[in-house]
Image (tube, rainbow, N blue to C red):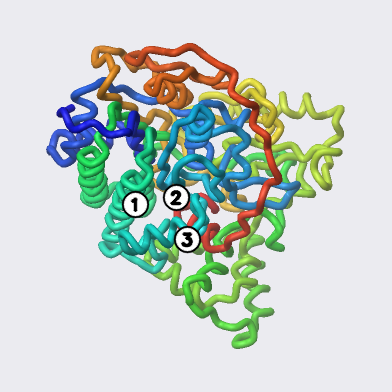
Amino acid sequence: MADRPQTSMQTLLVGLDAGCRSVLEPLFEADSVPHLESVFEDGTAGPLSSQTPPWTPSAWPSLYTGVNPGKHGVFGFLTFDGYDWDVVNSTHVREHTLWELLDQRGKSSVVVNAPVTHPPREIDGAIVPGYTAPEDPECHPEGLLSDIREEVGDYRVYAPRDAEGREKVEWYERLVEMRGEAFRYLADRFDPEFGFVQFQQTDTVFHEFPGDHGKVRAVYEEVDRQLGTILDQCNPDTVLVASDHGMGEYTGHEFRPNEFLRQQGLVETTTEGSGMPTWSTIADNQLQDGKEGKREDEDDPDLLEQAMAGLASVGVTSQRIHGLLGAVGLADFVAERVPTEVARAASEQVDFPASKVYMRDRIELGVRVNLQGREPEGVVPERQYDRLCDDLVRMLSAVTTPDGKPVFEEVARRDEIFSGPYVEDAPDVITIPREYDEFISTRVGDGQFGPPSEPYNHKRDGIVAMAGEGVDDSADLADAHLFDVAPTILATMGLPAGRRMDGDVLPGIEAVGTDRYPAFEAGEQERTDDEAVEARLADLGYLE
């Protein structure tokens, strides 16, 4: 990397959500992202193996704490209290973040757009929360969001939900620009020793425009422009680029474990709308952006509900209806006009209290047992728990696709995958799809298999690259893991890794040993309870 005047920033972490070689290589070949490519060419790079599950809300906390979900406590976008659910926030991350460890050692940080950091905890420096935060998030220090907007103009966490097509991509580019502008303003104001700026739109563009390489390129080119300006202004000694997971096309099938388990007599269903959120949630939340739905009394909702419920009884659910309407561009039109109760009547869902087991959230990649004494209305006696879990491992391991391939590459009890004090928050049996080429869905009523709901989705291997002071550019990063990022960043700043961390300092950076940092003191968990955030998750397919 080119020599620049010295500043206080020792290490810069650049987060590319869903960044991976298959996405970056065409951009490198086209010379579309020269600043990003320079980090890869001037230093060392390799694949970054993600964790289970490889999704934003769990993987980013693992990256910036250095521990597995069993230690930090977040396994998906949702947190559960019995059968009730809410979107996760920073109070559910029960381990020290990198910037909190640095604060304990007298080093300041600026963190912009890191997922699951709202509400922010106090440090020496600044925090602007990212994904799962509300649109006007609390920042640290208090009043910082107003300062940013006064200094750089508009600052948003999300694009407007009514943006479509090219306008939406322009919003993605603008959001990326906002991240860069805010980071540079805060770096100048706080002069931190550590900086972390995360770009979420490199993932979002795949969910909204799967396979549209032109739109992907537009987003990455803006990321590169912002990175170039950050490097010029901040002049970090060391730069590390990392992603939480990869992204790629799904060529397999969609498998629906709840439907499979229903046919085994283990799952019961309902059309009363008391299970997990479905497309009716999206219809509900159209109102959040000022879209007026028809009042229930403008037509005869009873007749409509009866008709929709009748369709549900023969397998025509609101999920299927939404998919068909979406294909002809009418899904939003209908969502604005159909009473929510009508959509919900046709939305067949898992009946949690009546079921023996269930997959509550596809992002968790696992099946939960409705255990007596643990769940509010548990039906499985504790004496049957171990045998039932073993039976689930056996039967799910044996499932094959219509073309004879295994659906799962691994099915295991949760304590074989996770370790730590919060393992019991995970599903009881973990299901890892084969090569992440089989799409997992919580749907019921549409058969066990179908085409993937999303043609592009998350893959296990992300990317990591390091360049700058103290980096051995000949180091082999072939075995790099997500958990290695946090101890590596500490090492670049001359600090030891935490003894609770599950990762190691990556090759190419000299390790500084380990130390016992103060234990994390978990406070009361706060509710997100934000329908607008829930609606955005539904838009991206995270809530089915």
**Cα separation between marks 3 and 1:** 15 Å
Percent position (x, y) of residue 444?
61, 50
71 sits to left or right of 210: right
Percent position (x, y) of residue 341?
64, 72
479 sits to left or right of 370: left
Check disc 2 and report its element: helix, strand or loop: strand
Quadrant position of residue 507:
top left
Q: What residue lies at 58% left-to-right and 64% top-to-bottom?
A: 280
Which amino acid type corresponds to the residue marked 3 in the rendered image?
Glu
Which amino acid type corresponds to the residue marked 1 in the rendered image?
Ala
Up-down: is 57 above or below 10? below
Q: What residue lies at 25% left-to-right and 24% top-to-bottom?
A: 468
**Cα separation between marks 1 and 2:** 9 Å
Quadrant position of residue 316:
bottom right
Do tag 1 and tag 2 residues touch (Cβ < 8 Å)? yes
Q: Which mark is residue 182?
A: 1
**To which residue does mark 3 refer?**
135
**To which residue does mark 2 refer?**
128
